[in-house]
Image: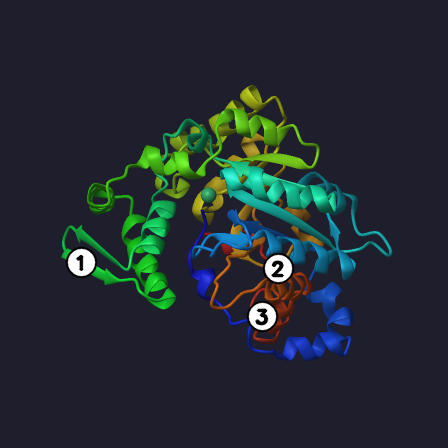
């Protein structure tokens, strides 16, 4: 699970200057400078085209297909994280095409049942970062629980300590999104208030963490089935999906190392890559990822991957993709993929004097 803010960013339904720059061929010339060596997408859950995507964690299979087809058609190679690392450490090669990496966080069952068939159709690699607590059913997937409850109800009532009984109207998508943001900010606190709030929600709506997890997450057997597909790279994503900077260094090290060791032992595949839960990290977590031996580690800071990142392989930027039915469609998803891959927004960053390349200097 990553930061929520990106879900509300941008409105791809509006034609932008980038459409014109792309049509005129300007972005193709600028791309190596502002798009870098490639791009890593971060997705979470996948649903069928005929389902109404639940905000804010889903992409439809149609959108995925359009993203893959658009990138391939425009000359991008879809590669694994191992290939990304090899390309960066091997240095730039004349005529080398840009790359795109697709990553899925947490270990959702639909990654196996819906995403993998799409990637098989395109013979394209994908990475799934698995949190072992998902497979063990020991993590409370509160972000997915509130997503479902908000989607299925026209109003949500809950008692939040310090604020009393709250009633959120959830008739429209805008109201649902606002309610999600409100509850997310309370629950991300991971404190007594958060614990009491989610407990009250589960009691009122007759559910609990284990049954919510059973709806959405892979079992160990399903994860093993996913892992044996040659297109799949399994990455680590800790044991309990904590916000790592809040832990002691020993706890953080244990979460990162134990999550990897369990996956390697029980799935029988090497696990060389890591994603920071919630995209929360600091210099300490970057150093731990190096110490534990992860070859790459990915964040949720938005950006592309540049050759300069060869010195910063444990804090790579990714592009969040969430499907908002009010804003996205498979065609718009493809447009998002291409404009991200070309680094259109990074061109704007550079013009405004903001960093174009994500590096470890951005974390304190
Ligand atoms: Zn996550």
| Disc with the residue nearer the chain's start (1 vs 3) | 1
Pointer 3: what residue? 349
Vertical position of residue 15 compared to residue 357: above or below: below
| Disc with the residue nearer the chain's start (2 vs 3) | 3
Residue 56 visible in the shown view: yes
Task: Give coordinates of residue 29: x percent, y percent.
Answer: 78, 71
For the residue pair 174 and 193, the one nearer the viewer reads as 174
For the residue pair 260 and 88, the one nearer the viewer reads as 260
Image point 71% across, 60% down: which residue? 70
Circle 3: element type: helix
Does mark 2 have its CB less than 8 Å from ligand 1?
Answer: no
**Camera-nearest label, 2 or 1:** 1
Circle 2: element type: loop
How far is mark 2 from mark 3, CA to CA? 10 Å
| Disc with the residue nearer the chain's start (2 vs 1) | 1
Which of the 4 image quadrants contains residue 290?
A: top right
Task: Give coordinates of residue 235: x percent, y percent.
Answer: 57, 35
Which of the 4 image quadrants contains residue 83?
A: top right
Image point 49% across, 43% down: which residue? 276
**Residue 122 horizontal side relative to residue 258, left or right:** right
Task: Give coordinates of residue 189: x percent, y percent.
Answer: 29, 48
Mark 3: few, some, or many residues within 10 Å (few <14, many ≥20)?
some
How far is mark 1 from mark 3, CA to CA? 40 Å
**Residue 204 horizontal side relative to residue 188, left or right:** left
Pointer 2: what residue? 357
For the residue pair 256 and 178, the one nearer the viewer reads as 178
Task: Identify the image's colour scheme: rainbow, by chain, secondary structure or one colour.
Answer: rainbow
Pointer 1: what residue? 166
């Amino acid at each position: 699970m990553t930061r929520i803010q990106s879900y509300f960013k941008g409105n791809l339904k509006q034609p932008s200057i980038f459409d014109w720059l792309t049509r005129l061929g300007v972005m193709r010339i600028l791309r190596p400078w502002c798009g870098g060596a490639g791009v890593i997408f971060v997705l979470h859950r996948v649903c069928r085209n005929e389902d109404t995507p639940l905000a804010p964690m889903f992409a439809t299979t149609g959108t995925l297909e359009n993203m893959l087809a658009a990138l391939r058609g425009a000359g991008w190679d879809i590669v694994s994280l191992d290939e990304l690392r090899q390309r960066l450490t091997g240095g730039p090669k004349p005529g080398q095409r840009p790359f795109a990496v697709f990553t899925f966080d947490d270990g959702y069952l639909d990654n196996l049942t819906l995403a993998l068939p799409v990637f098989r159709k395109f013979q394209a690699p994908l990475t799934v970062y698995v949190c072992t607590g998902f497979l063990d059913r020991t993590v409370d997937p509160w972000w997915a629980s509130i997503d479902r409850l908000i989607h299925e109800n026209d109003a949500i009532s809950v008692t939040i300590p310090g604020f009393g009984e709250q009633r959120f109207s959830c008739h429209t998508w805008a109201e649902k999104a606002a309610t999600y943001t409100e509850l997310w900010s309370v629950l991300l606190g991971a404190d007594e208030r958060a614990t009491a709030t989610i407990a009250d929600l589960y009691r009122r709506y007759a559910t609990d963490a284990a049954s919510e997890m059973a709806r959405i997450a892979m079992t160990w057997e399903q994860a093993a089935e996913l892992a044996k597909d040659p297109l799949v790279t399994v990455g680590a994503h800790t044991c309990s999906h904590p916000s790592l900077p809040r832990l002691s260094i020993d706890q953080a090290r244990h979460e990162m190392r134990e999550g990897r060791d369990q996956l390697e032992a029980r799935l029988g595949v090497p696990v060389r890559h890591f994603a920071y839960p919630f995209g929360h990290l600091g210099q300490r977590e970057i150093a731990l990822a190096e110490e534990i031996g992860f070859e790459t580690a990915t964040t949720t800071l938005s950006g592309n991957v540049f050759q300069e990142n060869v010195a910063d392989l444990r804090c790579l930027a990714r592009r969040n993709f969430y499907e908002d039915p009010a804003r996205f469609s498979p065609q718009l998803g493809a447009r998002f993929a291409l404009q991200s891959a070309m680094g259109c927004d990074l061109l704007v960053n550079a013009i405004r004097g903001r960093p174009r390349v994500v590096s470890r200097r951005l974390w304190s």
